[in-house]
Structures are given as C-alpha cells and as structure tokens.
Image (spheres, rainbow, N blue to C red):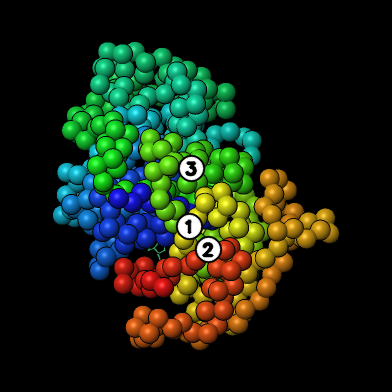
C-alpha cells in the first residue's frame, strides 16, 4: 500500500500529466485533488495525445480507478466533453468516480472571471476564482450533491442568478442568464454522471485501509498556491501537497511519498513576478525548443532559468521526498546554462522566497557549461549505460545537493519511453 502525491514545484506545466501516466501502472487509484479546468495535463502514448483538464491522467490504464475528488471544481460542459473525447478514442471510463462534494462552475462564474478592474491576474477565464469564492461564501455555491434535489436547486439557482446579474452590473457589464436552461443543463449533466457520483472520501479511505495504493495528481504549481504562492498572481485554491489531504479526505498520516516535479528551467503563464524570466533570445529559444504554449489557453508561456530560491521554498512547503526533472532535452544546444541561487534586494543577498516585492529582486546566477546536443540514439545509449554527459551530471548534482533531495527521474521528451529512472 502506497499513497503518493505528485505536485508541481514551479508555476505549473511541469509535466505532471506525463509523470502521472507513467507512475499510474503501480497504483490502484489515480485521483485529481484540486483546481478545475484551468489545468491542462498532456499525456502522450505513441500517436495518441490527450490534453486533460479534469479527468486524472490515468486514462491509458483502463483497469485503474480514477477519481475526481472533492477539492476539484467542475464545469459540467467541460467534463462531459472530456468524458466523450476519451471514450470516443476507445478508452473506457467506467472506472471514473466523482465526489458528491465537488463544487460546480456555473455560467456566471465564467462571466465574472476577470471583470474586476483591480490587478489583472491573467487568469485562464474558466471561472475558477469566482467558483472558489462562492465555495468560501457558502450560500451561493452549488455542489454535485445539490443536483439531486431538483426543487431546491431550481429555487437556489433563481436566487443566485439575480444576485450575480447585480454583481456583474457593478463592473459595468451586462449578462443574461436563462435559469430554466441552466437548471435543465445541470439535470441533464447529473443524469449522465449519476452512476459515477460517490462520497469519494469513504471510497479512498476504504481503499487505503484495505491495502490499496493511491496516486494523487496535483494541478497547477506550488507558486500558484493561494496561501503560499505569488499572491495575488495565483490561482484560487491550495495547490501544495497539503491540499491533497483536504482535497480528498485522506489524512496526512496516510501519505507515504511526495514527488515534486520541476522543469530543468522555469516557465510561467499569466501575470506576476518571475525573477529569472528571460525576455531575450534565450527565452525565445526555450519557448521554441520546449514548445511552451499553454495546454489550456494556448498562450505563450514566459520562460527563464531554473530558480533554486523557488525550488528550496517549494521543496520545504511540500515536504518533497523525491524530485523529477523534466524537459532536460530543451536545454540542448545552450552553451551556457544558468541557475539562480540567490536574489539581491536593496543591496542584500537572500536565499529565501519573499512574500511581496518579488518584482524588485535581481537574480544571482551560477553558470554551468552546456552539454553537446543529444539525439535519440545518444539517449538510447544513456538509458542503457545510465551515464549522463558530464556537464549534465554536474548541473543535476548541483541542484540535488542544494535542495537536499534525490533526483530519481529525468524526462527528456513527451513520450513515456523518453524517461530515465536514475
Ligand atoms: P502539466 O500541466 O504539469 O501536466 O504539464 P503540461 O502538459 O501542461 O505541459 C508539459 C508539456 O511538455 C506537454 O506538452 C508535454 O507533452 C511536454 N513534455 C513533457 N515532458 C517533456 C520532456 O521531458 N521534454 C519535452 N520536450 N516535452 C515534454
Ligand atoms: P497545470 O495544472 C499554468 C495560472 C493562470 C493565471 C493564474 C490564475 O496545467 O499546471 P486561474 O484561471 O487559475 O484563476 O488563473 O494561474 N494557472 C496555470 N498556469 N498551469 C496551470 O495548471 C495553471 N492553472 C492556473 O495562467 O496566471
Ligand atoms: Mg499544464
């Protein structure tokens, strides 16, 4: 029995999806515990490629049980489309279960996302913030379980939609909501998923108590965590490994392993400070070689060097027990590779992440020599011999030593077999 959490160590898109697909074969349950369809997790097997937003990245393992747990927020239309897409490709989702406590994204949430004239966060505009806000507000929220009491739901929707129209008007916008249609859509949604709806906290704890193994798939990256990230340029939920407990009902003492995923460099989508961002040709090259365009929104991702101040902080927050470094192939051809070890702010050198004023820090770098370009054949050799090019080994050893965590997996391409277990 093992319970493992997979968590992003940066600002998201660290290739959590790829890793979950690889690890899934050793687990009975694959569980998404936070976020909504702001997430985009890509899994690729042969010529099959999926960008998943809600369903856990275990779809290629049909016999495994997949769970969308209580911490996730669900856009009904997106979930139905995704189920349809996966099933049309020939993968059964009869083993998919959905928490009856998960909250629902409604049309007004999407209209309200990003209308605020305050700081522009550059959200994915999927209604994430407004839905989690309603979850916290409580009396304007709708959960999956509420879809089972139709008369109560109808009244509730009428009340909320009136309130939301007024809220949207405050921002100088107008919207129209056909409450009847929203209600009918929700009932239709419920009918399509009702055999999958469960109290997943009991499902998962029963599984663990009878010896089952569980893989918990995080969305976003630790620096997008609402408490610990680069607030206010964050998402609206907790993201770090602790959220795997609140987001599923699995207690902390049942967690055995916490796998942190980091790219060999850094990316960020949306607004907010990014100390090691490269707004130059090197950044362009990372974007091009790494194909750094958002899985969800298609936006170009901002790219920069690896930041150890970030990783030390996120290793601490998550209690990372092992580290996976992805997209090492993207550094191919760089003569010099830099790693940020400290920040300088007001003439002082610091190695701890700060809670505000991050846009004022200047990164201090250590330079590494790049390695010769590696092709497929070179990687085959490396996989056989487990011997990395000297320069790459120096780069990775430095990272591992600074973070005091073992790097046990290296990813050098989107495919399953482009993975090296060290
Ligand atoms: P996630 O949100 O953390 O699951 O990551 P995304 O799927 O949003 O972004 C990662 C992207 O990198 C996807 O397009 C993957 O197919 C791709 N990818 C994953 N691992 C590697 C790798 O080692 N090298 C390269 N070049 N691409 C990778
Ligand atoms: P995965 O799981 C990268 C970012 C958005 C924006 C901020 C707030 O694929 O790693 P939101 O819509 O959540 O209110 O937007 O968070 N963001 C992500 N960036 N990967 C993600 O998920 C993200 N989910 C949210 O770009 O800056
Ligand atoms: Mg992603």
Marks 3 and 2: CB-CB under 8 Å?
A: no
Q: Which mark is residue 239?
A: none
- Give SS at disc 2: loop
**Gap between marks 1 and 3 measured at Cα:** 14 Å
Task: Work out whether residue 197 or residue 332 is closer to the camera in this orientation and state it.
Answer: 197
Residue 337 lies in what quarter of the image? bottom right
Q: Can residue 415 be seen by looking at this rendering? A: yes
Position in image of residue 185 (x %, y %): 26, 28
Residue 65 horizontal side relative to residue 402, left or right: left
Mark 3 and mark 2 lie on one chain; the one further toward the N terminus is: 3
Q: Can residue 123 be seen by looking at this rendering? A: no
Residue at 72% in and 66% down: 364
Q: Which mark is residue 321?
A: 1
Mark 1 and mark 3 lie on one chain; the one further toward the N terminus is: 3
Marks 1 and 2: CB-CB under 8 Å?
A: yes
Position in image of residue 67 (x %, y %): 29, 42
Vertically, is 330 above or below 304?
Answer: below
């Amino acid at each position: 029995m093992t319970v493992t959490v997979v968590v992003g160590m940066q600002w998201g898109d660290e290739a959590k999806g790829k890793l979950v697909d690889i690890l899934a074969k050793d687990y009975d349950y694959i569980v998404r515990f936070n976020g909504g369809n702001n997430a985009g997790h890509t899994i690729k097997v042969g010529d099959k490629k999926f960008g998943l937003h809600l369903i856990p990245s275990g779809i290629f393992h049909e016999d495994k049980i997949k769970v969308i747990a209580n911490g996730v927020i669900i856009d009904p239309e997106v979930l139905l489309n995704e189920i349809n897409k996966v099933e049309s490709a020939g993968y059964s989702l009869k083993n998919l279960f959905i928490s009856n406590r998960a909250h629902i994204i409604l049309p007004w949430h999407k209209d309200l996302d990003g209308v605020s004239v305050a700081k522009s966060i550059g959200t994915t505009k999927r209604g994430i913030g407004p839905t989690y806000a309603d979850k916290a507000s409580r009396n304007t929220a709708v959960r999956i379980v509420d879809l089972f009491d139709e008369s109560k739901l109808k009244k509730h929707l009428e009340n909320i939609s009136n309130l939301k129209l007024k809220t949207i008007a405050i921002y100088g916008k107008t919207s129209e909501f056909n409450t009847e249609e929203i209600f009918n859509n929700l009932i239709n949604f419920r009918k399509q998923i009702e055999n999958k709806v469960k109290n997943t906290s009991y499902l998962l704890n029963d599984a663990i108590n009878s010896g089952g193994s569980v893989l918990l798939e995080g969305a976003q990256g630790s620096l997008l965590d609402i408490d610990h990230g680069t607030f206010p340029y964050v998402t609206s939920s907790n993201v770090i490994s602790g959220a795997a407990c609140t987001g599923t009902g699995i207690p902390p003492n049942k967690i055995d392993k916490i796998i942190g995923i980091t790219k060999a460099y850094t990316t960020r989508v949306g607004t907010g400070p990014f100390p090691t961002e490269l707004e130059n040709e090197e950044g362009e090259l990372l974007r091009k070689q790494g194909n750094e365009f958002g899985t969800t929104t298609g936006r170009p991702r901002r790219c920069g060097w690896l930041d150890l101040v970030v990783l030390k902080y996120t290793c601490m927050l998550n209690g990372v027990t092992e580290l996976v470094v992805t997209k090492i192939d993207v550094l191919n051809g760089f003569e010099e590779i830099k790693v940020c070890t400290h920040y300088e702010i007001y003439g002082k050198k610091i190695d701890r992440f700060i809670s505000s004023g991050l846009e004022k820090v200047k990164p201090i770098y250590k330079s590494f020599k790049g390695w010769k370009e590696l092709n497929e054949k070179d990687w085959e050799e490396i996989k056989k011999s487990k011997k990395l090019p000297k320069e790459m080994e120096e780069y990775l050893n430095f990272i591992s030593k600074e973070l005091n965590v073992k790097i046990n997996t290296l990813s050098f391409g989107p495919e399953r077999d482009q993975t090296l277990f060290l």
